[in-house]
Image (tube, grey):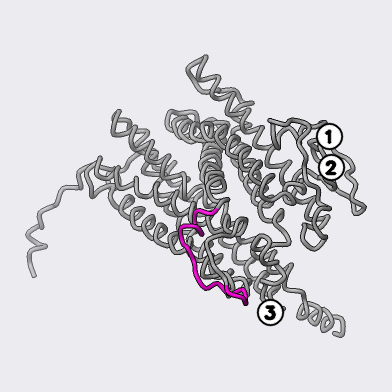
Amino acid sequence: MIATVGTIAVFAAADPVPWARSQMAFTLMFHIILVPLGVSWTFMTLIANYRALRHDDRDALLLAQRWSKYMAVTFAVGAVTGTVLSFEFGLLWPRFMDQWGEAFGVPFAFEGLFFFTEAIFISIYIFGWRRLRPWAHFWTGVPIVLAGILGSVSVVAANAWMNAPTGFTTNSAGTVVAVDPVRVIFNDSMPLQAAHMVVAAYLVGGFLIASVYATAMLRGRTDRYHRLGFIIAFSVAAVATPIQMGVGDSLARWVYTNQPVKFAAIELVPTTASDVPETILGRLGEDGTVSGGIPIPGLASWLSDPSTGRATVVQGLDTVPADARPTVDQVNIVHLGWDVMVGLGTLLFLLAVWYGATWLFRRRMPASRWFLGAAAASGVLSVIAMEAGWIVTEVGRQPWIVYELMKVEDAVTANTGVWISFAAIVVLYVAVGVTTILVLRGMSRRFRRAGGFTDHDAPYAPGPPVQAPSEQEKVP
């Protein structure tokens, strides 16, 4: 009994910072899995829909119709999890919102407009299968694609503002007294961060959907319908992968120039130096030395600025006070996240090259079990790479919530009971995740049993004939 009371007392006096961080990280990592589907799935659906109308392709039409129904489910779940995130800004970080809400909230106002636009046109697109002419129905899907991209850009603009805060004026007390919405949204970090996230959405969304069809093909479902579903999704991901590597390289150089301490954490650079090696794995010790891993001499300096090569100087972690840089544990997390993101991204790029080369030289998709097995794993691997990238972005900025203006510990709630909401959120999100998977699997089983179009849901087909009432039905 005494032990139980003591345990409760410990939790009741818990530091809210790690619990608030954990809750925000958990909900964001859950929600971010749904974002690529919300941004990219409609685009792939429209590819199938276009092919169906242009070439009278019944398999493509069936694919587009079914994908639109899956898309509606993931959009609804994403709306719920995204709403929770919005509330968490006020509940977990009230001092941050109190001081910076006028600026930080600007991109979210636009995101709300794009969200409602997307929701409206998703409804029109789904209910328009039997109610609109084929090409009119197709064009109702285009605003969904645009709203998804612009909504994602709006949210990323808010996060980019935290990395490069601009567009506001403060008084002597540090209170925001004027905001320039254009400068807030189009801050210095926004173009590359937004491009990185949008391309990631198409990369991850493509690999996720393709992995489902690759798994089905490994199980013997090699009909044209499954091959077409795989080809559309994997082709989108294959095109996005090299683009993402180029955008990511540019973003890394932006970090090198504008957030040198984060870059030092990424590359495990304890002291300022030139000819800095690229250390694969490895870790930073409490004494400031790097141990383990595989160092590639001079590569980190060369990648930072190829014009000066190995002579490029990389600023070290020790150039700022200890309370203005990530802790040793955070540095190791950032470096590991970077290695995971780059490593998995490279593997996915090689898989895309394999796919593209086979199309180029053999005019068909690779059909070996090795390729299909790798493609089946690509969905999970792409999600892990995306999650690792966000870890690099967020943990690398520590201890700042607004870069060099406000620390996390100064932004968090004073409520020591955050651990209760964190536990409740974990239980709720696990239930939502399991339910979502079960619903999608149930829909898939029903679609497979149906085989093809049925009379009552065939898109663009005439409705069933109206039966004249019988003589008996006419009797009042």
For the N terminus, the image quarter is bottom right
Q: Mark 3 points at which residue?
A: 415
| Most foreground residue, 343 or 317 | 317
The numbered mark, 1 or 3, whose residue comes first in the sequence reads: 1
Q: What whole-number distance in Å separates the C-alpha atoms at marks 2 and 1?
A: 9 Å
For label 3, the SS is loop
The quadrant holding residue 158 is bottom right
The C terminus lies in which quarter of the figure? bottom left
- Give the residue number, with chain letter if any, for mark 2: 282
Q: Nearer the viewer, mark 1 or mark 3?
A: 1
- Residue 163 is drawn in which quadrant? bottom right
Residue drawn where x is 52% and y is 73% of the image: 177
Name the residue carrying label 1. 295
Residue located farthest toward the top when viewing the structure as drawn: 361
Cα distance between the residues tagged 3 and 2: 37 Å
Tag 2 or tag 3, which sits nearer the N-term? 2
Question: Do tag 2 and tag 1 residues touch (Cβ < 8 Å)?
Answer: yes
Q: Which mark is residue 376?
A: none
- Answer with left or right where residue 72 lies relative to residue 238: left
Three-letter amino acid code of the residue under disc 2: Gly
Q: Does the magenta stretch include residue 396?
A: no
Query: In this view of the protein, which residue sits in the foreground, 404 or 388?
Result: 404
- Residue type indicated by callout 1: Pro
Q: Tell me the distance, in whole angstroms, between the alpha carbons under discs 1 and 3.
A: 44 Å
Near-viewer residue (387 or 309) = 309
